[in-house]
Image: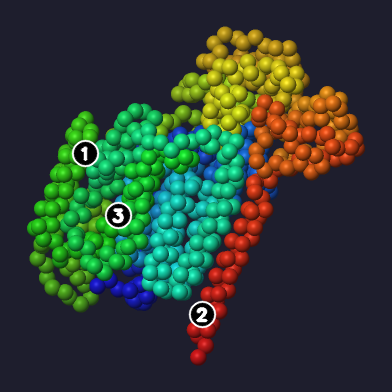
């Protein structure tokens, strides 16, 4: 039988510190060793794709804001990428992300910074998995193996860890969140650990982790309702309210902003892009095969995206799981099934795309079940029948994988040979005759468990090394940006005013010298010059259409002519309406020197780009760039989120244009918003304003009253939970 949690804790209290920490310590050391081993093969392994072009630049910018004692809310100069509350993954409410940002701002090397933080989170993953596996009934050795296997799963290593930083942070923290939730709700322990871990997960701003948290909370609530446990129902409702209120604060601005962005038109469709089919799941135990996961590079992505653990086909060794353990694992079954349904779901479900992102959570569930089942079955319950069943599953999974990816037959055969050898090893160790129990010595079954677990950890390390020989980097692309931050900070130094990049400026990314002329995505934040061409997850639809700009800042050839064209409605050049003073034009798109309009000049010609500047530099974006006929205003005060105007005269055209995108959340005191010029330039109508009056244009994340109320209520829920628990404990101690 599995000891009850309270019994486990009493037993642990009588054990030595070394006995309690040696297994989790081993799992952390192995996990960090594997993580750093990948860097020995490829120093840029953790500085790829979205980390390279997205995360590090925003971390650096966040750190810069924090050193100025500010939090970023809005940056008009960043245009469609500058609505930071809506962007979400900036994590501007997350103290952990603040630490990452501050350390990025002072880090001499971007790749080293990313590696250090990601290795730390993988270590947290191992700790959380160990604690969670123990909580569900796994012995320490099997829990330690689970803690090594989960951070080594294919999607975690090759997609989240290499590129999608916030996805990694969420999946690494989830086991710890789940463990603290179970302690707080089911055992009535202090809710503070859950409040801290869940707050951290939600404020990272990555919605997929929040979806998983919702599944866990709903499962917990339903289970307690079925059990009619009033105290636990109340604690679950408090935990759910805390999570829901912070989810409103973090994600509602993006939802309210989405109608003006390209996200509003995201379809519900299955294009078979970064989702799996049932046959792909048969590769879950094969570490050196890809599965048929379609992505940016065709029908097969070069990476083990559905790989969970090489031990998966050996699960029949430990079946059937005893009934009491099955009941205790109900939350794991629910999570696993829910995440499996998600992984097999359509590739596009509105703004929720690419469901294979849920593979780390499928891996967590499968590995937890494996650890608990092995604890209850090994070594005494292994039989020949179970060995043959496991061998049959190895053969079946190998065959189905081979049918789907015949080109990987050597890798499949190698994995099958490894699994059969492990199967034989398990059998031999389990059947080996040993002396009986001797007081003061480890029991025979404990020695057998330790032997197979240590051997399995060693095999996991070898498998990780083999993966690195086959896939030295993530299938997600690297743009080979410099990693020295001082080199990145020097790009576009001294350029006039705000800048924008047009054309395909990705050409030459593999040539080190090219990086002296341009950056990419959010790396532009490291430049002293404000640049509009930063990365965004919410492209402003009208802006993106007019400048044919994508979410990475790339544009078509027409963007330059659009910037230098005269707007029909205002009679002002579009670049002036945007307050742009510098244009970097990629020679790949404009091989011949573009004709320069009046008021502009070619500042210099680079090898990769043309650099144009306005003859008279304009102020940074955010202020007034046009006033209607007969209308005159003066800017009394301007910040990133507010502009105060003094109206001097109101003419036949009472409109005033500001170089800002009209995001939801703007309001005007003393006047009214008008239809945006060109559909993406914030416009104010001062028709009803008397000369001499002031007008204030203000931006607050929408809907701000709801966000403020949710913020306050969240802390009240936490305070109420803590006070209620303290009162209950005092009453319990009172005779």
Query: Please, what secondary structure does the residue beneath circle 1 have?
Result: helix
Residue annotated with mark 3: 367
Q: What percent of the width, then of the height, locates residue 32?
A: 38, 50
Q: Quadrant of the N terminus?
A: bottom left
* The quadrant where residue 365 appears: bottom left
Residue annotated with mark 1: 401
* The quadrant where residue 336 appears: bottom left
Q: Are marks 1 and 2 in contact (CB under 8 Å)?
A: no
Residue under the point 52% across and 58% down? 243
Query: Please, what secondary structure does the residue beneath circle 2 have?
Result: helix
Note whether residue 576 is visible: yes
Residue annotated with mark 2: 729
* The quadrant where residue 370 appears: bottom left
Q: What percent of the width, then of the height, locates residue 138?
A: 29, 64
The answer for how far apart the CA atoms under marks 1 and 2 are is 56 Å
Q: Is residue 558 above or below residue 672?
A: above
């Amino acid at each position: 039988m599995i000891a009850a949690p309270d019994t486990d804790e009493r037993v642990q209290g009588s054990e030595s510190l070394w006995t309690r920490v040696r297994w989790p310590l081993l799992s952390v050391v192995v996990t960090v060793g594997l993580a750093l081993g990948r860097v020995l093969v490829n120093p840029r392994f953790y500085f790829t794709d979205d980390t390279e072009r997205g995360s590090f630049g925003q971390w650096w910018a966040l750190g810069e804001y924090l050193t100025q004692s500010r939090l970023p809310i809005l940056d008009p100069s960043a245009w469609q990428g500058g609505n930071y509350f809506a962007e979400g993954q900036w994590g501007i409410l997350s103290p952990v992300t603040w630490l990452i940002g501050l350390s990025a701002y002072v880090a001499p090397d971007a790749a080293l910074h990313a590696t250090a933080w990601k290795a730390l989170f993988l270590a947290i993953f191992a700790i959380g998995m160990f604690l969670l596996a123990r909580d569900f009934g796994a012995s320490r050795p099997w829990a330690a193996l689970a803690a090594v296997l989960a951070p080594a799963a294919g999607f975690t290593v090759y997609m989240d860890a290499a590129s999608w930083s916030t996805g990694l942070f969420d999946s690494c923290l989830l086991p710890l969140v789940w463990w603290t939730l179970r302690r707080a709700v089911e055992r009535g322990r202090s809710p503070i650990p859950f409040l801290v871990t869940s707050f951290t997960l939600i404020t990272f701003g990555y919605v997929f982790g929040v979806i998983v948290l919702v599944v866990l909370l709903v499962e917990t609530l339903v289970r307690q309702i079925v059990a009619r446990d009033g105290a636990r129902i109340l604690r679950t409702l408090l935990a759910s309210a805390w999570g829901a209120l912070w989810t409103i604060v973090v994600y509602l601005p993006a939802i309210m902003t989405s109608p003006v962005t390209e996200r509003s038109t995201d379809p519900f469709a299955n294009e078979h892009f970064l989702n799996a089919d049932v046959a792909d799941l048969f590769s879950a135990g094969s570490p050196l095969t890809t599965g048929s996961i379609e992505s940016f590079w065709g029908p097969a992505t070069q990476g083990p995206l559905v790989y969970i653990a090489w031990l998966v086909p050996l699960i029949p060794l430990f079946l059937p799981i005893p009934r009491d353990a099955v009941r205790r694992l109900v939350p794991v079954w629910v999570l696993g099934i829910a995440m499996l349904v998600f992984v097999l779901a359509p590739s596009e479900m509105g703004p929720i795309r690419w469901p294979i992102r849920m593979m780390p959570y499928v891996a967590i569930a499968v590995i937890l079940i494996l650890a608990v089942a092995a604890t209850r079955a090994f070594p005494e319950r292994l039989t020949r029948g179970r060995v043959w069943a496991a061998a049959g599953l190895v053969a079946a999974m190998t065959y189905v994988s081979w049918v789907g990816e015949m080109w990987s037959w050597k890798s499949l055969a190698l994995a099958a040979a490894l699994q059969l050898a492990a199967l034989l090893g398990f059998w031999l160790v389990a059947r080996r005759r040993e002396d009986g129990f001797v007081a003061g010595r480890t029991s025979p079954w404990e020695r057998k468990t330790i032997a197979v677990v240590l051997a399995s950890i060693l095999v996991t390390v070898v498998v990780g090394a083999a993966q690195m020989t086959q896939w030295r980097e993530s299938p997600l692309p690297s743009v080979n940006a410099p990693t020295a931050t001082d080199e990145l900070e020097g790009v576009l130094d001294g350029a006039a005013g705000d800048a924008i990049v047009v054309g395909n400026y990705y050409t030459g990314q593999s040539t080190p010298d090219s990086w002296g002329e341009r950056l990419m995505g959010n790396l532009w934040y490291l430049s002293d010059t404000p640049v509009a061409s930063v990365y965004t997850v919410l492209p402003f639809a009208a802006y993106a259409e007019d400048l044919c700009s994508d979410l990475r800042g790339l544009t078509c050839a027409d963007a330059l002519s659009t910037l230098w064209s005269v707007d029909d409605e205002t009679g002002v050049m579009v670049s002036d309406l945007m307050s742009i003073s510098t244009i970097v034009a990629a020679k790949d798109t404009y091989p011949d020197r573009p004709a320069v309009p009046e008021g502009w000049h070619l500042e210099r010609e680079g090898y990769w780009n043309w650099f144009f500047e306005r003859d008279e530099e304009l102020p940074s974006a955010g202020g007034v760039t046009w006033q209607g006929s007969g209308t005159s205003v003066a800017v009394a005060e301007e910040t990133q989120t507010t502009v105060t105007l003094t109206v001097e005269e109101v003419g036949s055209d009472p409109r005033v244009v500001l170089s800002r995108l009209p995001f939801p959340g703007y309001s005007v005191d003393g006047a009214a918003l008008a239809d945006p010029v060109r559909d993406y330039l914030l416009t104010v109508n001062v028709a009803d304003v008397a000369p001499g009056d002031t007008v204030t244009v203000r931006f607050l994340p929408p809907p701000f009253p709801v966000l403020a109320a949710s913020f306050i209520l969240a802390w009240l829920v936490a305070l109420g939970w803590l006070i209620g628990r303290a009162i209950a404990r005092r009453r319990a101690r009172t005779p």
